[in-house]
Amino acid sequence: MAENEPKILSFLCNWCSYGAADLAGVSRMEYPPNIRVIRIPCTGRMSPKFILAGLRRGADAVWVSG
Amino acid sequence: MKNLLEHTGIAPGRLHFSWISSAESTKFVDVVKKITEEVKALEPALNYAKTEPKVN
Amino acid sequence: MITFKLNGQTVQGEKGQFIIQVAEKYGVEIPTLCNHKALEPAGMCRICTVELFDGRRSRFVTACNYPIWEGMEVKTDTKLVHEGRKLIVELLLARCPEVPAVQQLAAKYDIAEIRFTKDTDTCILCGLCTRVCEKMGARAISMTGRGVDMKVDTPYHLNTDACFGCGACAFLCPTGHITIEKINREHTRQKMQLIPSEYDMGLKGRKPVYVPYAQAVPNTPAIDRDVCMHFKAGGCQICMEFCGVDAINHKMEDEIIELEVGSIILAPGFKPFDPSRFDAYGYAKHPNVITSMEMERFLSASGPTGGHLVRPSDHQEPKKIAWFQCVGSRDLNRCDNSYCSSVCCMYAIKEATIAKEHAGKDLDCAIFFMDMRTPGKEFERFYESAREKHGVRFLRSRVHTIDPLPDGNELSVRYVTEDGKTIVEKFDIIVLSIGLETPPELVDLARRLDIELTPGNFCKTESFNPVATSREGIFVCGAFQGPKDIPQSVIDASAAAAAAGEMLTSARNTMTRKKEKVPETNVIGDRPKIGVFVCKCGSNIAGVVDVPAVRDYAAALPYVEYVSDSLYSCSQDSQQTMAQIIQQKGLNRVVVAACTPKTHEPLFQETLINAGLNKYLFEMTNIRNHDSWVHKNNPKLATEKAKDLVRMAVAKVALMEPLKETELSIHQTAMVIGGGISGMTTAKSLADQGYETHLIERGDRLGGQAVNLFHTAQGDDIQQKLSALIGSVESNGNVKIHLNTEITKVEGFVGNFVSTLSNNGASETIEHGIAVLATGAAPHVPTEYDYGKDPRVLTTLELDRKLIADDPGLKKLNAAAFIQCVGSREPQRQYCSRVCCTHSIENALELKKRNPDMSIYILYRDIRTYGEKEYLYREAREKGIIFIRYSIDKKPVVTAKDGELTVTVTDHVLGRPMALSVDMIALATAIIPYGDEKLANFFKVPMNADGFFIEKHAKLGPSEFATDGTFLCGMAHYPKPIDESIAQAKAASSRAVTLLSQKTIFSSGTIAQVETVKCASCGVCVSLCPYSAPAFIAEGRFAGTAEINPVLCKGCGLCVASCRSGAIHLKGFDTDQIFSQIFELADAI
């Protein structure tokens, strides 16, 4: 993996941001291919442990979106 | 959370939060672009990963 | 299959394919200007020249139209090919030196100078235009002339009818030689027009094949036959060739389908008023005068400007925007709509607030209005915050004319302020807040259906039957019943469903079919055997992501036993194949890498069930919406991303366990709390649909507040209708009435409530499946305006009682005053009581009827006779009732001196106090909710700051609570008149029946569960859950620890994250499953 292509671990709420991501696709918008999405049922599910685990295991950044 | 990260030596730019409704695809794209740019501007995350022994 | 060599590589293609098609498949680029997938190749531009070796000698052929054959050898990158192409490009550049497409090619082939004589043409004679014109079936243009005079033209260079102005030629022209302007000028007599997008109010164009908007249901494209070239000229059908699943059939014809139904519900909606007929506003002439519907699109992120607010004339950011209210409403002079459209005040405030949020604080937003009408739940607070927090200006003035300024952008308006000053102000955009109207085709429909309409052309209904039309069996909901907003439309919709359901109860479930069940294979303890199915989605995914590579990558992942790819995984035959493979290969986990689980997960889960697998042994990953569609310019990284996503999904699915969906029976009994009009209506509706219903009333009689009311706004005699309703409830065998009864205890949850009732000390328990809270509200008892001190000052409810009793004293009054907003719209009670304006005007008219000589004054802040109640306001003014406006900081003063009752009010026109000598003052008092904390706790339902219950969703779930099995209606929700209370009562019944009629419900499998031994009994989950799912176990070994009711749990995971002992697990999204995804991602880095 090239160094300038970071991987951003993304936790997206099923009902909000995941839907927005779907719609972005339907609208054929373009954005950088660096995010890796994990679908969660609600941002309430988020635990700080996930963020720390992601960063510790080498994700370049973590993004949580409700 | 961000403070904790800073304390452990991780740049706060590595953690992002946002709220986007399911109709706001434009906002979604804007946020992805912004975050990607910010993260690219940071040094590669070498300081705290990969070499860490597995705990679990 | 034909095998041949391409640049030394052995490649394969289908018989009949051309070289360029096979080259594209293998990623070998061949330049071309004249080739298009949809058209027959012509070999016109010659740039695609390649070298062909036929076994004996080499020659040059055009790759676009040379068919492949077995054993041929093709070379695309030799020096000779390069030089040949270079010469062709140089010749083209000499002919068309200014054309960008040719210039780009020239740069690619390093052509610095042109050795030939330069021309100034822009056409390269590629023939795309003439071929596509022929394909369209129009044949309007062709190559005319010969040799150097050859050009594309219509016969005799005349504008022709043969050209339909479809624009296909301009769309395909690679050089810009053909433009839409040129077609309109030189070629066609049928001028070319943009097809306006209906959804974007014509601010954007759309294609003849289109999906109306992104969220449309069904989300399949439709062909607009009026503009499609195939239906105009008989040709084209390119869409058919490109559709991978042969879904397009132009020969489909309209069918007339006859259905036998027991009831009809009309929900045809409204049409926004067209303001172009108002010359003085210049909507049709000036681009910066727009309608509120257009403003909605400008503010929308998916709108024509992507949510960026611009002035339409020059696309500059506006500095000042004005809204004009009541355009096409409350207006008899310029149009026939004298009703109030109900929704415009709120949407104007909303638009102004959003505009300020988009454009920043400096944007000036002004709303010109007559009366500010915000009588809905939480609306008054919204109005206040727009004014106080956002700084939206509210100007009470009706502007007559908009004057465009010579610069073509700004608009000038002249208006008179409340204190009589004339002001001229300039704005960048003026938004006309257009009203709601019934279109002529609906008036026609009403005539054909033989149903009556109101004077405003809305469907005529009665106060006590607000969703029934004048014809039995036909019901109505939404804006066709009267102008109304979303919550009210949703309430009406449920009410209409209930009304139809009451009629058709005997037919319920007579036309349903039962599904066969495949026995579930037990996979617990088995080693994971994962099947990965990668979808190409036609070219939607495969066009960007290297699907075979992803498939092969998946095959090497742990526990993966089977991989495959398919053109469309969701097609019926793919589904059948998938089910077969699962059974044949003994797969016990499935990953589908395709589109979004939000739409397709249920479909694939169905396939798993059909294959005998638990539907939760499944994971879907989104390599279309989140990958191929959004990274089309980066196939390499998109493929990488797809591999990552698949790997994460495989890791997660390996940890999936079969989940059980708890089955729960629903007790077929209902409980309705509150014996007012709402409660009785709900009880009657439920009983009529066959459910035993307990109606609980703490008082000693049924009827609630309605016993004090005289007439409805439509003039119905309330007492007469009320006793009829009470009679029908009392005589209904399915309704058990409990008077003088309080609820002392409620246990259980959806489907299985157990409530304890107390009746004069005697206690009784009732089991019921659902509960409806219809507890109503009470009148405010005023402390101001000498109420209680002077018997001539009374509340409007007390006046109603006098009217009911036909009090002879009323006829003798010489003068009476009504004071509005007594206790409403005050800082401590920031809501409008909704009914008082109409109620006072109704009473004032009744007094006028009894004594036409009586002077009547109504002192008000804003008259809020929304909808067709506006007619009463007009009638009152016509009958000489005097309306005087006061402001909250200068309230009227009531004095009783020497037996003379005087009310003093500061008139806003004169600006000085005016003393009115009257014989009676009626106070329009606020409606106060009971704010019954005990009841709220019993059913675990929330209340707002004012004490009204909070519904599940303000717009979409107005008659139910977030907690399953509990519903609400009537004034416990918000103050409302009788017709709206009855509609909501029926709506609550309808919502309840959707649950009751299922008899049993299944909980979702993806819910939280407590690991009892780890629970520390801290109670965080119990207090946190918005759905009241966790509770402490009352007895037994684990007493005191928390337990989650699977039926109430929505699987949000809030409790899981909050649990400090790690005792709660969310099935399907458990911590180890999410960790596995995180680790899989990390391991690849």
Image (cartoon, coloured by chain):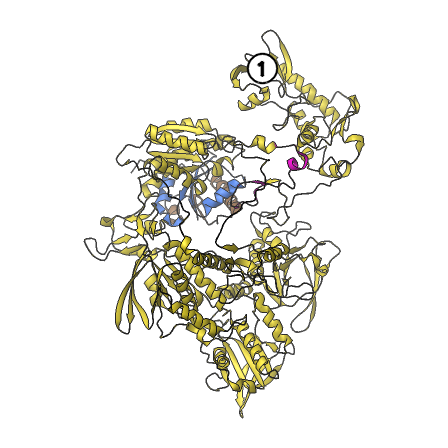
Chain colours: A blue, B brown, C yellow
Residue C1085 seen in the figure = no
Q: Residue reaching furthest top?
A: C56
In the figure, C289 relative to C760: above or below?
A: above
Q: Left or right: C236 with respect to A3?
A: right
In the figure, A15 relative to C722: above or below?
A: above
Q: Secondary structure at mark 1?
A: strand
Image coordinates for residue C752, horizontal then vertical, percent = 30, 57
Instruction: Give the labeled residue for mark 1.
Output: C74
Q: Please, what is the dominant secondary structure of the magenta stretch? A: loop
Instruction: Tell me, yes or no, whether the highlighted magenta stretch contains residue C218.
Output: yes
Q: Which residues are magenta?
A: C210-237
Image coordinates for residue C316, horizontal then vertical, percent = 66, 50
Q: Nearer the viewer, residue A63 or C113?
A: A63
In the figure, C289 relative to C543: above or below?
A: below
Instruction: Tell me, yes or no, whether the highlighted magenta stretch contains residue C101.
Output: no
Within-10-Å neighbours for mark 1: few <14, some 14–19, many 20+: many
Q: Nearer the viewer, residue C422 or C621?
A: C621
In the figure, A24 relative to C111: above or below?
A: below
Image coordinates for residue C954, horizontal then vertical, percent = 46, 59
Where, quadrant-wise, is the C terminus of chain C in this rendering?
A: top left
Taking the spot 32% from the left edge, 56% from the top edge, the residue there is C751
Q: Left or right: A57 with respect to C352?
A: left
Q: Nearer the viewer, residue A27 or C967?
A: C967
Residue C867: image quadrant is bottom right
Q: Nearer the viewer, residue C242 or C379?
A: C242
